[in-house]
Amino acid sequence: MTPKLYKEEEELIAKALSACQHEIKPNFSKLSREYGVSRKKLSRRWHGLPSRSTRPPTRRLLSLDQEKALILWIEYLDNIGAPPTNQQIEESANYLLGKDFSGPGEAPRAGKNWVHDFIKRLPKQYVRIVQKPQEKERTVAEHYGEVERWFIDLELAIQQYKIRPQNLWNFDETGFIVGQGKDEVVVTAYPKTSKRYRHIKDDDWLVAPASNGFITDEIAFKWLHTLTTSLGLGPSRIGGYFLWIII
């Protein structure tokens, strides 16, 4: 049944119920013939059962408030350039269920198909895309011992110069994708990366997409200039060290 026909039928059912509202035991068969609607639906409405369009989906696991919180979390991650995967969305839903559960036994958990049904209910701008990880050749070229040595040197430098966490800045061509070693499907409102990064609103991020996908001298200079200006760095500054990690 099309939405238009469904709406027309619901209007006829409402008129039929209005006509028999003062009856103790309505004749649903007669009303069905008079108004040209389903006798079964008339009986269901009379006994207080909602229509399919107004009752909640059978697979809606979260409350409306929990779903709103989850959507806000997805929006936040997406706006800082780290759109979530299906697994992350499911884990967050299970966290909310466990946090708000107060009954006996174990808290309910998302089933096998829950996340797919939930994604269908997201605002229409959200889509699923495949996000590419670091190129295989670059990953293979990284030697574990060298990476470990780099982090040891980093920790020693932080201790030696007493660098505070708020004075440590990362400068990179892309964001971090922790734990991702293969193509990953993510949920985002910005299927084109450049558009997504333009919507980042977090003050701790400064993003400047390049037309060719690689950093330019102009972007690097702008980043350094903005950072030094905002932090009040310069020849006249006294005390304290900053650490810039340029990758």
Image: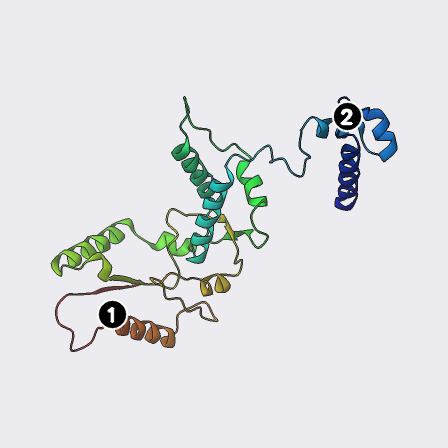
Labels 1 and 2: the sequence-earlier one: 2
Mark 2: which amino acid?
A: Glu
Q: Which class describes the residues within 10 Å of circle 2: few (<14), some (14-19), or many (20+)?
A: few
Task: Name the residue located 75 percent from the left edge and 39 percent from the top edge.
Answer: 10
Task: Name the residue located 44 percent from the left edge and 43 percent from the top edge.
Answer: 88
User: Is residue 120 left or right of 25 when viewed as pictured?
Assistant: left
The residue that label 2 is drawn on is 23
Image quadrant of residue 5?
A: top right
- Dot 2: element: loop
Query: Which percent across, then down, holds residue 206?
Result: 37, 66
- Dot 1: element: helix
Q: Nearer the viewer, residue 133 or 144?
A: 133
In the image, residue 59 above or below residue 8: above
In the image, residue 232 above or below residue 37: below
User: Is residue 203 left or right of 232 when viewed as pictured?
Assistant: right
The residue that label 1 is drawn on is 231
Query: Which percent across, then down, holds residue 59?
Result: 57, 33
In the image, residue 101 above or below residue 231: above
Q: Nearer the viewer, residue 55 or 242?
A: 55
Query: Which percent across, then down, holds residue 182?
Result: 45, 48
Q: Which mark is residue 60?
A: none
Mark 1: which amino acid?
A: Leu
